[in-house]
Image (tube, grey):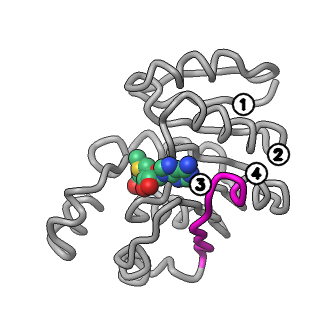
Amino acid sequence: MLYEELKDRFGEEVVRHPSVAKGREDILIGYLERIKPKVVLEIGTALGLSSAMIAKHAEIVYTIDIFAHPLRKEIWRYLGVRDKIKDFVLNDAEKKELCKEIQFDFAFVDGDHSFPGVKLDLDCVKDKCDKILVDDYKVCKCVEELVGNVEGFNKEYKRGFAYLERK
Ligand SMILES: C[S@@+](CC[C@H](N)C(=O)[O-])C[C@H]1O[C@@H](n2cnc3c(N)ncnc32)[C@H](O)[C@@H]1O
């Protein structure tokens, strides 16, 4: 399992950061296998564990976070996916601009889990791609409400993830 391998290799820092790799990677990988995306936008990089999983199933991953972490590039190199990942450390205004500029066919939203944060991230991606996966649907009530408000998409919910696919 990726998480156990990285924990052994990189230690406590891997344990300290939240990640879908901690027990729910099968859901993310299941969607990647089903969707077969080419270019993916991820919001919420953390240590880059989900970015690495996405990179194994896509040609390019754009990933955005408000914080830099030196270990993420080391992890990507260790896993052999560094070349496929374009990472950005941006504030919300800059993130909004980047999302307008780039083209992507799948978005993974796992950044700021506050109501305005999730709203902004959904607004950044919902007119740009037809497939969106949002994490922590069950943990944050606001995700449930905001995903419910997005029109024009079929929605399914699995172990904390909300998946939206354009009708
Ligand atoms: C749950 S972690 C991401 C975990 C990662 N996707 C994974 O599964 O390995 C959430 C990340 O979102 C970042 N974040 C918080 N606010 C943000 C914002 N406004 N825009 C982008 N990222 C943000 C945090 O710094 C944190 O690294």
Q: Residues within 10 Å of mark 4 (few under 14, many from 20)?
A: some
Q: Is residue 39 magenta?
A: no
- Look at label 3 and name its amino acid: Glu
Q: Is residue 67 above or below residue 114?
A: below
**Residue 12 rendering spot, x and y as whole percentages:** 15, 65
Element under disc 2: loop
Mark 1 or 4, nearer chain start: 4
- Residue receiving disc 1: 165
- Look at label 2 and name its amino acid: Lys
Mark 3 Cβ and ligand 1 under 8 Å apart: yes
Q: In this view, does 166 lie above or below 92?
A: above
Mark 3 or 2, nearer chain start: 3
Mark 3 or 1, nearer chain start: 3
Instruction: Tell me the residue at 66%/45% (across/down).
Output: 35
> Pointers 3 and 4 in contact (CB under 8 A)?
no
Q: Which of the labelled discs sits on residue 128, or is there none?
A: 2
Mark 4 or 2, nearer chain start: 4
Element under disc 3: strand
Mark 1 Cβ and ligand 1 under 8 Å apart: no
**Residue 148 rendering spot, x and y as whole percentages:** 64, 16
The magenta span reads: 84-95
**Residue 21 rendering spot, x and y as whole percentages:** 33, 51
- Residue receiving disc 3: 42
- Residue receiving disc 4: 105
> Pointers 1 and 4 in contact (CB under 8 A)?
no
Element under disc 1: strand
Q: Quadrant of residue 60?
A: bottom right
